[in-house]
Image (cartoon, rainbow, N blue to C red):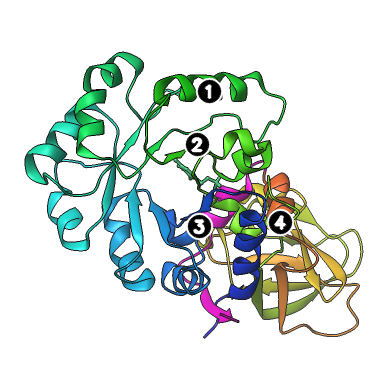
């Protein structure tokens, strides 16, 4: 099989989860949306559940199917998008906990699933999801009487430690939840790093489980090796790839690798991404095609069977910088065609 191999170190993910948990007295959940940021829910969630994670978050109810199977019947699975019109059956069947975001979602929950677990999201200024001040004030008593599992909000600028929005949202969240005897949650990975005032009762790391920014101090659990399917020798002046954008300035050995933008290697990576053969870097040359990329291997002393794009020499944040994006997008774009292999766990 000629596809990239994505090797995922479950022990490193668990170590990152534990390192984040050690920074707080709050309960540490795990955010598993987008198939655990591209790493694969079945194995990753099972490893975290085995390590003691009891609360998990997904974006939509459909993501709860694989997660319930992996994390077991005792795990609490929160659905961040809440209770949509078509979600009721799945929420009931899988015993999911919708995070209700609006008066309409609250009514739907109370009408269709009375007495079943739910959580509440408050908008503290991000203006994306959650109850606004007035809507919340109108239903607070009714909600508290029904016993929400969690009241949460989300920080817009937590990756910028000194951003004034952080303290603003913290203050508003405190005001909107003052004196309520309900578990509260505000912090994702960035919020954990802002310190204990932001932690409340439950923290919700996602990207930090993979040692990517803003938790670049964590371990890199990923390795992506792309197989070489052909090599050729070019004389000076020959060109490579669509649009003839790269021209050899010297006799050059070119390797063609089996991955492209259809596997999540954004075309913007063409501007300077490096591959690695052990500790030796090699430059990506020419345009990225749908299924293929070309790399200058002139300076290697042997013919590599594959080259490494993500690994010990280079984490997702380096690639993100090259492609002018963020580690989250690099990770969640990692191709469905890659052969995912797990170690540890
Ligand atoms: C994605 C998400 C998280 C996790 O964020 P990270 O920055 O990946 O840690 C937590 N809470 C909510 C509401 C989210 O949407």
* Front position in the image: 215 or 277: 215
As drawn, 313 above or below 269: below
Q: Earlier in the sequence, mark 2 or mark 1?
A: 1
Instruction: Give percent across and percent down for residue 5.
Output: 59, 77
Q: Which residue is mark 1?
A: 169
The image shows residue 91, relative to residue 150, as above or below, that is below
In-front residue for pair 94/76: 76
Q: Which residue is mark 4?
A: 286
Across and down, in percent, residue 301 comes to 91, 82
Residue beneath label 2, please?
186
The stretch in magenta equals 324-345
SS for callout 2: loop
- Is residue 124 left or right of 318 when viewed as pictured? left
Mark 1 is surrounded, within 10 Å at the Cα level, by few (under 14), some (14 to 19) or many (20 or more) other residues, namely: many
Instruction: Give the CA separation, mark 3 to mark 4.
Output: 29 Å
Q: Nearer the viewer, mark 1 or mark 4?
A: 1
């Amino acid at each position: 099989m000629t596809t990239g191999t994505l090797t995922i170190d479950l022990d490193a993910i668990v170590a990152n989860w534990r390192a984040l948990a050690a920074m707080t007295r709050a309960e540490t959940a795990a955010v598993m949306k987008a198939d655990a940021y591209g790493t694969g829910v079945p194995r990753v969630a099972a490893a975290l559940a085995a390590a003691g994670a009891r609360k998990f978050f997904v974006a939509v109810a459909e993501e709860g199917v694989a997660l319930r199977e992996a994390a077991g019947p005792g795990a609490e699975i929160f659905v961040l998008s809440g209770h949509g019109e078509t979600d009721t059956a799945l929420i009931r069947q899988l015993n999911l906990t919708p995070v209700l975001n609006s008066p309409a979602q609250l009514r739907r929950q109370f009408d269709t699933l009375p007495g079943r677990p739910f959580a509440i999201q408050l908008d503290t200024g991000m203006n994306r999801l959650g109850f606004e001040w007035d809507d919340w004030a109108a239903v607070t008593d009714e909600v508290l009487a029904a016993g929400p599992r969690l009241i949460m909000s989300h920080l817009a600028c937590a990756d910028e430690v000194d951003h004034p929005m952080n303290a603003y949202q913290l203050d508003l969240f405190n005001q909107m939840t003052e004196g309520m005897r309900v578990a509260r949650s505000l912090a994702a990975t960035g919020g954990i790093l802002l310190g204990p005032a932001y932690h409340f009762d439950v923290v919700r790391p996602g990207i930090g489980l993979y040692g990517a920014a803003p938790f670049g101090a964590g371990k890199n659990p990923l390795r992506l090796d792309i197989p070489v399917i052909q090599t050729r020798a070019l004389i000076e002046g020959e060109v490579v790839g669509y649009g003839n954008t790269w021209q050899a300035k010297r006799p050059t050995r070119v390797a063609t690798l089996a991955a492209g933008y259809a596997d999540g290697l954004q075309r913007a990576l063409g501007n300077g991404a490096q591959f690695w053969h052990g500790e030796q870097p090699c430059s990506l040359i020419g345009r990225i095609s749908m299924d293929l990329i070309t790399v200058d291997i002139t300076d290697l002393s042997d013919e590599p069977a594959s080259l490494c794009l993500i690994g010990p020499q280079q984490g997702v944040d380096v690639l993100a910088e090259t492609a002018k994006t963020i580690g989250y997008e690099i990770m969640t774009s990692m191709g469905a065609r890659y052969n995912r292999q797990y170690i540890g766990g």
